[in-house]
Image (cartoon, helix red, strand yellow):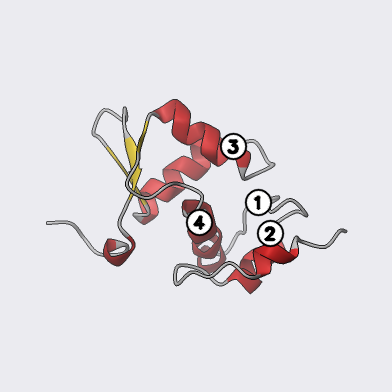
Amino acid sequence: MGKVNEGLINEVSTMYDMKEVMKFLDVEGKIKMYPSKRKKQINVLGYLIEKIQDGREYTEQEINEVIGEYHTFNDVCYLRRELVDIGYLKRTKNCSKYWRRQEENIGQEEN
């Protein structure tokens, strides 16, 4: 097993524990497997949501492409749904547009 890029260690976020996430990344910083425990899943999803530009709207195809770039187990739809379900990613009712939820609002219910 190879070493993870040193640059990955220096990423800072309040949304996830990089030390924990690194266990699920390959040498290129791609998610190589999805954890079974929910706490670890939330850490991995926190890492993944940072790959999505804040303040930008994406089409479904565009969001799938971004997610596809950062994992190796070929389940873009599952990861996209997880990001939506956990509240990190928002979408229109018809699923035509996606955007990153503001970090200060993550985990809070919308009114």
Residue 13 vs 26, above or below: the answer is: below
100 with respect to 34 (left or right): left
Residue 105 picture quarter: bottom left
x%, y% of residue 19? 65, 73
Q: Secondary structure at mark 3?
A: helix
Residue 15 picture quarter: bottom left
**Would you name the residue on which mark 3 appears?**
68
First in sequence, mark 2 or 1: give its number: 2
Residue at 46%, 30% (x, y): give it.
62
**Would you name the residue on which mark 2 appears?**
24
Q: Residues within 10 Å of mark 4 (few under 14, many from 20)?
A: many
Which amino acid lies under the numbered mark 4 shown in the image of this protein? Leu
Measure the C-alpha gap from mark 2 to mark 4: 11 Å
First in sequence, mark 2 or 3: give its number: 2
First in sequence, mark 2 or 4: give its number: 2
105 with respect to 22 (left or right): left
Measure the C-alpha gap from mark 2 to mark 3: 15 Å
Q: Secondary structure at mark 1?
A: loop
Residue 97 vs 16, above or below: the answer is: above
Residue 75 picture quarter: top right
**Would you name the residue on which mark 1 appears?**
31
